[in-house]
Amino acid sequence: MVAVDSDVVSHKHGPMQSPIALSFLNRWVRTCRLMSVLGFLMWGSAGDTAPPPNSGDAFREPVGLSGGGGMFTPAISPADPNLMMLNCDMSAAYVSEDGGRHWRMIHQAQLRSDTRCRPAFHPTDPAVIFASSGGRLRISRDRGRTFAPHGDLRESVHGEIAINPADPTRMLVGTGGGRCARSEDGGLSWQVCAGPTGRVIGFHFDRTRGGRTVFAATDRGIWRSDDAGQSWVERTQGLPWKEVQAFAGGSDPGTDVVWLYCAVRSKTVEGRFQGGIYRSGDRGESWEWAMRSGLNTDTRQADQWAYGPVAQYNHLLATDARPATVYALNTATGFHPPHHDTVYRSDDAGDTWRATYFQDPRFPQFNVAHDYVTASTGQCFKGGETPFGVAVCNTDPDRVLLVRNEAHLTHDGGASWFVEAAPTRRQGSPGPTPPGCNGLVVTTTWHYYVDPHEPDRHYIAYTDIGLARSLDGGRTWRWWNQKTWAPWRNTCYELAFDPEVPGRIWGAFSSIHDIPNDNIISERHGHRGPGGICVSRDFGASWKVEAEDLPARPVTSIVLDPRSPRDRRTLYAGVFDEGVFKSTDDGRTWTLKRQGLGHPDNRRVSRVILHADGTLFASICAKRPAAGAPLMSVGVGLYRSRDGAETWEPMNRSLPLLYVKDFSVHPRDSRRVLLGACDAGGRPLGASTGPTTEAKPGAGSAGKDPRPSAYFHRSARAGSTRP
């Protein structure tokens, strides 16, 4: 999925004219903003040129829930421990300059996300950052505001970028081909290393030897070089097997102490725990077991919530500042301590360990500040896995950053963990403060609403995390909980507000996310899960199913006719793969209305809009008959009904499209339509301005060109002869 600046919602709202006017105005503004964003995408792809850095920061601030999408590959600057960076799986990368309390999104034309490669901060110059942009090495010289291509590395970057702290001109990287590459001129030129093979897990430069001795760990073993990476020798003596899962090292030239740590796959052998964490105090010549006091060595599940019968140690962290301090992160063999997934810490190189991370508020040792999940539900819903990524500051071993769908940080070595700058009430107090936004807006926002009756109430319809609401104009946000959420809580696609009854809202929900994005269209994600319509009578605080006669399919859109009677509202709902349904009794019963809509092979309705003049619009998105197959030409397009959904007519007959994304209708003139698409159905990419269709020259191919385009329709004769 693509998440660019559309995830950063402007924190502004104006006076309310009418509920329906606000709905149409929001749609028009949102789509104009979408087209602007799409223009930036095309601009960036033509040369990765971006607007001036932070050109909008003075009047724009992120709002909403912090987190929600997966975050990966974090890093902390050794030159400035407050400077941090991470990537998310929604295409964006983020930087913090205040120790992780607030984050800013890096413009995608400067740097594209890479969840498979950890960035690297220069050891002494905090302005310099090396990072992967979709696999290609880039450098920033201004603390992550701008990035430029760097060096001649031809393979994609993968795993880790490492810089020799003693000589920053010497660097190592992992590559997508399962090899390592080295540079001796600060990353300008690269040579492939002869020796290490496999997926790179980590590197360590031995500072007691000026960094000329260097270690590389992959999922196939551990290697050492004593000539700055020119030649390598495998160093795995003492390990039971070479299924390496984690690696870290620390070396202090002041004390001549070097500690290396690795974790191999944990197994049960003859009823006993084997594998896990090992350490070396002789630069890898030999390895000894470090699973001593305090670690999880279970050999069977403690309860039904276990991730597995044995704990896997997938992350290790160590520093040059204090080589004997090491962190280990494990999967859970049960939900409750001591079987839970946690962050173990040792200050004696693995002789003894203690757990430092207790995320669930119900744990007596609870020491993690509330995020939006725990603040709303009173518990966490962790699945027992290790974090998606972890980092430690090489000059301050008490600073650790771990990321899942939220970012948790400690500045005191694990004694406490925080999520954002805002203070949070602790266990035993009246309740946690609803969290604000720390800038980590990392999932798709379908709609942002200001309540038509009480403008301090705001709502966000999300992918993956459903619905969020604010009672204070967007400053803090509340998630829903077990007693109040919709049965299909993955995604809220749209809300419809009653224009006369305060607090009455209908919602379109689904267990399937990302419709109509490409992972659905290309069959990478399943789309046959359920969805439905719920109603709230308390301003979105709780939701109830009342709808009958609806198939168990994703509901992608819902609109209300404000001209219908107050006690018998007319509503229209787009149901994926089915068509448009209509209700004339407040959403209790529904009737399918699809005469002329789409094609029997494609009725993937993704958006419905009701104009103030009564004209109803529906878009049908792209479809592939199977993964890898060409896009289908039937059904897809924009449709219009002038008789309350009884019959439908295609609007873009003169401009066939294979991949319609979204559209908007002018609030005062239903003949003026903006339509966003990813192809021109075999015609060149361009703009349609009617009354006859013209496609300006461009580069496009049927169903294959992924670049988005905008089409502007302003004539009733484009696809129809009706006035």
Image: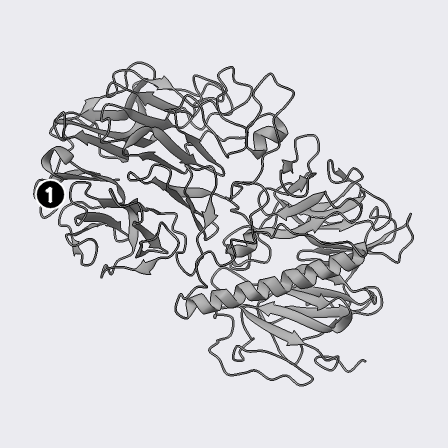
> Vertical placement of 390 versus 665: above or below?
above
**Residue at 46% across / 29% down in the picture?**
384
Most foreground residue, 565 or 125: 125
Is residue 527 among what the camera can see? no
**Residue 452 percent location from the top left of the image:** 78, 49
> Vertical placement of 26 versus 386: above or below?
below
The quarter of the picture where the C terminus appears is bottom right
* Mark 1 Cα-neighbour bin, 10 Å: few <14, some 14–19, many ≥20: many
The quadrant where residue 234 appears: top left
**Residue at 28% across / 19% down in the picture?**
347
**Residue 275 percent location from the top left of the image:** 27, 25
> Vertical placement of 290 versus 204: above or below?
above
> Vertical placement of 484 versus 497: above or below?
above
Residue pushed farthest front?
Answer: 58
Report the side of 640 relative to 56 (left or right): right
**Residue at 22% across / 26% down in the picture?**
323
The quadrant where residue 202 appears: top left
The quadrant where residue 660 appears: bottom right
Amino acid of disc 1: Trp
Q: Which residue is mark 1?
A: 232
**Residue at 64% across / 75% down in the picture?**
712
**Residue 475 percent location from the top left of the image:** 62, 40
Report the side of 148 relative to 4 (left or right): left
**Residue 47 percent location from the top left of the image:** 39, 69
